[in-house]
Structures are given as structure tokens and as C-alpha cells.
Image (spheres, rainbow, N blue to C red):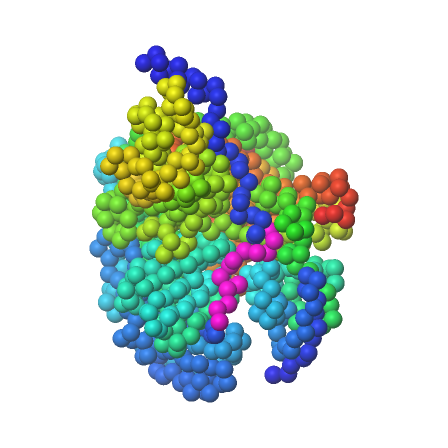
Amino acid sequence: MLKEKSDLNRATDTPKRFNFIGQSVKRREDPALLSGHGTFIDNIKLPNMAYAAVLRSPYAHAKILNIETSEALALEGIIGILTGADIKNQIGAIKPNWIAGDIKVPDHPALAHTKVNYVGDAVAFIVGETRDVVQDALELVEVDYEPLDALINEEAAADVDAIQIHNDLDGNKAGTPLMAWGDYRQAVEEADQIVKLRLENNRLIPSPLEPRVLVANVDVFSGKTDLYIPSQVPHLHRRWIAETLGWPEHKMHLICPDIGGGFGAKMHLYIEEVLVCYASRHFGRPIKWTESRSESHLSTHHGRAHTQYLELAVKNNGQVLGLKLEIFANMGAYLSNMATGVPSVNCTYFANGNYNIPHYFAKTNLMMTNTVPVDAYRGAGRPEATYLIERAMDKVAEKLKLDPLEVRRINVIREFPHNFYDSGSFLECMDVARDRVDYDGWRTKQSEARKQGRYIGIGLINYTESCGMAPSEVLARIGFDRGGYESAQIRVHPDGKVSFATGSMPQGHGHATSYAQIVASTLQIPMEDIEVIYGDTDAVPMGIGTYNSRSMAVGGSAAKICAKKIIKKATKYAAVLLKCDAEKVTYRDGVFTNPEDQTPSEVSFAKVARLAAVPHKKPEGETPGLDEIYFHDPHAMSSPNGSHAAVVEVDIETGKVKILEYVAIDDAGVLINPMLAAGQIHGGVAQGIGQALFEHVQYAADGQLQTGSLLDYALPKSDMLPNFKTEFLFTPTKTNPLGVKGIGEAGTIAAPPVIVSAICDALKPFGISHIDMPLTPPRIWKALQNATIQSKTGEN
Amino acid sequence: MSTHNIEITVDGKSYKRTTESRKLLAHFLRDDLDITSLNIGCDTSQCGACTIKVNGEAVKSCTILAVQANNMTIETVASQATGFTLSIVQQAFQDKHGLQCGFCTPGMVMTTLELLKTNPSPTEDEIRESLHGNICRCTGYHNIIEAIKEAAQQSQFQGASSC
């Protein structure tokens, strides 16, 4: 034991030469992207390539009586047009990947043939020689529609008098999954008060800056299909496309070069993905399809879109005994990939947030409407959960006349492991955030400002979530038709350089850098010696992909374990060169050492790699080469947590909000690259502030999308956002060998409730306790006009 | 559809082409000249990913027709590096992690050059205002602002013309 301890000390005294974990290494991706040499898919042109455009329904709900394509087909440069009738028996229905419980799945054909169900629903797929000619042809296809009444709102869809969108879905409900623990009725009996709330979680457009784009090329002789696709989940996409087309998977080759952002929008099966492959084979041409931004608003899946009813059973001291939740989740016109699980699992499992709530009951109504399908968007259910419980904490504080932080402190989870959370720093983060934002100082300033007729508000919220949904058996239990693992493959070349492949797929995350940090640190060789490969289903072993903040937690762990296996085998080869027992060989800083004083006493990783590749002498019973492949299926998820604080000032004349301070305290365990982690927080918070203040999908009553372009859908711009103060706490998880927890979604989860909380705090003197998102100047102004002014000066 | 013959210089290379009168410069550069060092992120001139320099001025290349660029000199982000050495602005973006997916980046860099040309030591508010026409969905702008501050400082140090 003593010897081990002294070894440990020595290791600490002299840091390993090649340890890159926890270092803000600059990204190797950047020089090409900064020089305009990114390989975004729309940059790709194949010889003899044709172009495609999708004709979309202008009606939210209508019968298709006839489609006339002859005039469009006569246009010079048009190669052909596919309609629903053409593909009916050729392309299967678009199916969801997550069926969270007893769910009815409405039919979703790749091209509508009898009825369209939302503005944007695809009706025809036009192929022509140029980008322009297919756009021209869109105007020449004549479709006779018989318009029907449309349903937009998720609650209205549940009315007994509502029209029915899909024949087989009574009451427009795809299902009503339940979730419970404890006994909420008991909480009601023990409670002093019942607090009620109705919340809208506004519909958003994820909006990666690169629209969706595809290039398909089917070799009709071999049947091999190359599909360039900006997919967060290349191997899953390969399976879904192959299944839908009924084509064999080994003939499908998906290639994902640089992806211009994803945020969840590029991880679902879309109709264009199967149509472009089918059309390439049908017309015998490589085909490119690129959506425009406005088209993207009509066709790329939206996010959030909940109406939530909450009831909390509370004691007068602020303790929350129970939570009852009913969600109306807008699914849109069809059930998209993960749509049913996002509200009914990702939201309802985490609706207690960072708090001990012993009794809980939740019901999720999965409502079909005549709108763009809704699916996972950065956070996917956790933002909806965090928002509801944090708004509830404020409401409880208001009702009991307690400080909102005090209510949180009374209920916060302090002991771990707890429920889904293996470890955490819930209370610590709250204290650090309170300190860093100077909560008490701002309370004083707030009170002084009010005397001058200025309205400052302070918000501080907590969040937690779970990353890397696993193990695979758990996914089976919740109806999620995918694994929870990630792949890693390391090939060691004869010169000791390494090719590392991962099933993860970055969309700006910096995986070429962060994975190289993990692999180089474990193999103890320079980062330059590691080439990171992803986004090619022929080159990368079956993996799952990048979403759910899972890449480092699951893929990174796979990389580390895989690299360790390499060292184990390399040690045996080193023993051959060192002429000693493998058990005696030690490895450090890229060098294998024989502790016994004999020649040779050292041998480099590269020399060992050379011997393994040219194995003229092999360790007994060993195979040639050092290459390893490893699939890591974690036994549990990881749960990052944090506390964000915001200070705002509201101009009560105009309703305009200025964010004076934004402080993010996050604990994602070990950080591989703190610079990249902070970048994830910045970007996530910006999107969260977008939801809270600016972004909102607006439909007219007849189902026309009124926020159909970037002119009217308000993405945050540089002069609409503050600087962010970020700080990290480090509570490593024990659920994976790296101790990392995931960071990608934290900002979008934390920012909406903290901004709304701060604004409502500012408006407290007017008796305003809640405004639904987005809190735009008109909405705030309207709330102010409606409010009874309790006191314009003095204390709350 | 009427067509026009145009001559255009892009990143130091001259091109003669025939173009349809309706074609936007952004599409002409990308589709007709295969110059992909500008990106198209929207169709309403909001995102700024297609920003280039036309006769030395930063322009969103989706806001002018190709035919209007006849006889003009165009610079894209591809001409900013010297060999494989990044320019001051490009290097600052890498150093400060001012890009994630990189799709908005060509436009961000070109807009930064325009800002620093007219205002070599901008305040944070001035930087934020100057980027109003360039949307980034990844970084929350925080590190882009940091990168531009850094680039401004480095350019002052090395002489304004070197950014």
C-alpha cells in the first residue's frame, strides 16, 4: 500500500508529457473553416449532377383532388417529377424511431397522395438540370386542393368538437403516456396549499445556419448508394433510409462532411432523404437537394410547443410535497422521429428538476395538429421540464411570500445518488451563482432603483439533466428503437501514428480536437499523431451519433477504453523487444520500459507499432497488429447540473428588456476542453435567451406560417445579447471512466427560466407574476397595461 | 430569360462568363464559378454568411445580381491567409474560439475586416452593432466579440493594414 502511495505522489509531481485532458487546446478544425475551405454539402458537385426541388402544400389541411404535371414536364431542363402515386408502393411510410408507450402512429407517406396535413407537406419531387429550372417548375405543377378546416393549437385539438386530422386517431391524440412516483393524492392531503400554474412553452425553429442539403448518387450497376447528408446520426440515418426504401443497408454509404450546425434538427428521418435516393436510382443521375431558409421553416422540424398545467401541493414553510402535471404536447401533422418521447419521457422524468418532490403524477397528451412536425431541439424535453419547475418555484415563493432562493434551498436535493442523478453539486452551484452575481447587492440596487422608477429584476434558477441515454436495455423499456452505446475504433499504423474513428458526429462541436485529446492522452503520444475520423458509414464502425450531450460521456469513454486495450496489447509486443515478461513492462510518455537493468531498457510506441504491423516476432498466442474496436454501452446516464443567474432591467414605457448580467455556473464533471465547454454554454444560453425574449413560431388560424422567414422569425443577433460570465464546478461522474457529464444542452435548458424569472421579478411591483414566452416588448407592455399597479416605488 | 456576358475578378483570378440576368452574385460565385468560400444561410439577406468584398467594400453577395458585379474585383475569405498562415483576424477567431460550425465564419471574417478598416479600435457596443447583419447560431457571439477585440489589438500592434 505504501509503495502505491509513493508511486501516486511521483506521478503527481511529474505530470505526464502527453496529457491533454482539461486543456483548452485550440481547434484543428478552424484553419480550413476560417479560410473558406469547409466542405459543406452544398459545395459538393458530382459529375452529371441534377437538382431537385420539393413542391409543398400551400394549405394546412386539404384533400388532393388532382395533380397535373404536364406543363412542368414540358419545361426545358426538367428530367422528371415524382408524385405520391408514383412512389406509393416503392417507398415505405416515414416512421418514428421512438414509440414511448401505447401510441398510435398515423400514416406518413413520403409524398402526400390523398390529403395534405400542414403547410409544407410534400406533394411532388421535381428533378431537373439546374437549381433554377426546378424552382421554375414548382410554379407549373397544378394541384387541385379541396381545403379543409385546420387545427393549430394543441389544446384546441383536444376539444370534443374538434375536427379529426387522421382517421385512425380519435380526438387527435397519438397517446397519453403517464408518469408517476409516490402518491400525489397523499401530497394533497398533507399540503397546506395548492399552487396552480398554466405555462406555454413556445414553439421554436432550431435554425442551424446551414439549411438541410443532400446529394445522392446511386450506382445502378452495383446498387451502391452514396448519400451526402448533414446527419447528427449517420448510422441511424443509414438504417432508417434503407428500411424505408427497402434497400439493403450494406449498399448504403452515408457521408457527412462539415455540418453547419444541427441542434437536433439534423437527426430525424425526413422525406427528402428517401426521395433523393429513390430519385437518383429512378432517373439514373446524381441529385442534389438544398432547402432555402424559408423552405426550412416549413419543412425542418420545430421544437418545444407545449401547453402545461401544473399543480403543486406545498407546506406553508415552502416544502413541495407533490407535483401534478398535464402536458398538451403539439406533435404537428405527423409523428416525427423522437417526438413522442421528448415530452412524455425527457420532460416528465425530469419535471422535479433539482428538487425533492416525493409525490408526482404526470399525463402527456400527444396532440396532432396541422403544423410542421415537432421533435427534439437542443435540450429536448429538459428545457420544458426545467422551465416548468423553476416557474413553479417562483410561484410558490410568491404565494408564500418567501424569497425565491429560499424556496429552492428548502427543496433542493442534497444527497447523492438520487433518483437518476449519480452525483451533483446542486446546492454548491446555487451558492456560487448567488455569490458571483452578487444577489444580495442587486437586491439593494433593485430597491434603490425602484425609488427612481427603474425596474430591475434578479433571477436565479437551477437545472439538471441526464446525458447519454443508456444502457441499451433501458432504451428498449421506453420504446426507443436504438442503442445507447457508442463505437470507437483505433488503427495503429506501422509508424506509430493512429487513425481513430468514432460513431459520434460533430456539427461544430470540435470533435476532431476533443477526441484527439482523449486518445492522445490515453495512448500517451502527441495529439498530432492522432487523426480523427467520423461521418462516413463505410469507414466508421456502427455508432449512434451526437445528440443528448452524449459524445464525450459515451463516445469519449469508448475512445478511452479502446485506447487502453491498445496499450495492453502493445505492452505484450514491447516485452518481445525488451526481452522480458510483459507484466514487468511499464508505459509512460510514449515509452515502454523494462525496469530490470538490461539492454534494451526502453522502446518507443512507434517501434512497438512497427513490430506489431510486421510481426516477425509475436508474443505467444497474440494476433498481428494493435488495432482495436470497442463499443461502449454505459451502465447509467450522467447528470450535469448548474445554476444560472440573470439581472435585467425592464423599461416599463416600452416593455424592452436589457440583460445587465448573465452568470452561468455549470458542473459537467471533468471537462475535456474547457474552452469548447464554455463555447457550448455561450451558444446554448444565446438560444435559450432567444426562446425567452425573441423567438416564436406564429401560425394564423388557417394554418399559414406567419414566421416563414428570417425576416419574421427573430433569431438573436449580436446586439441583442449580453456577455456571459461562465464558471465551472467539477464533480466527476462515476458512471463513465472519464468522469465527464455532458455540456451541449445546458444553456438552452437554463436560460429561458432564469430570464423569465428575472423579468417577472422586475415587474413584481405591478403584480405581474408570469408572462408567457417570448417576453417581447409588446407582451410585456400589454401585461403592464393590464396590471393593477400595487406600488411604483417602495418595496415589493 | 435574358443573359449577359460578364467579366469578374475573384481572389485575384479573372473569369469571363455568361449569366442569366436574374442570377444573384452569391449563386453565380458558388454555382457558376465553384467558389465556395462564402455560404448561403438564408433567402432574405438576414444571415450575412455570403458576405464578400466587392471593390473593397463588404457586401452581402445575395443582395446584388451577378450582372451588377461586371468588371468588379471581388475578395472572399479564401484570399485572406498568406499561404497557410492565417491573417490576424482569422488567427484571432481561432485563438478565441470565435467559431463552432464555421458556416457563418466567412461572412463574420469579412465583416470584421470592414469594421476594423473604418474603426480600428471599436468598443464592444460598436462591434456588436457592426455584426447586426451577420447571424451566428452557435457561439452566442461572445467569443466572436472577443476575437474581434483581439484582432483590433493585434492589428494596432502590427499596423492597421495588416489585418
Point 39% across, 18% down: residue: A597
Instruction: Judge whether A343 appears above or below B70 on screen.
Output: above
Residue A44 is a magenta residue? yes
- Total labels: the figure holds 0
A473 left or right of A240? left
Point 55% across, 40% down: residue: A26
Q: Position of residue A442 (x, y in %)?
A: 57, 31
Point 39% across, 64% down: residue: A226
Residue B30 is a magenta residue? no
Q: Position of residue A117 (x, y in %)?
A: 36, 70
Point 34% across, 27% down: residue: A579
Q: Nearer the viewer, residue A148 or B84?
A: B84
Instruction: Judge whether A382 appears above or below A607 on screen.
Output: below
Q: Is there any visible trace of residue A13 in the rendered image? A: yes
Q: Nearer the viewer, residue A604 or A672?
A: A604
Q: Which residues are magenta?
A: A34-47
A255 left or right of A763? left
A334 left or right of B135? left
A43 left or right of A277? right
Q: Position of residue A24 (x, y in %)?
A: 53, 36
Q: Residue furthest top?
A: A2
| Location of residue A578 by image quarter | top left
Quadrant in which the N terminus of chain A is drawn: top left
Q: Position of residue A585 (x, y in %)?
A: 35, 25
Q: Is there any visible trace of residue A719 in the rendered image? A: no
Our reading of the magenta stretch's main secondary structure is loop
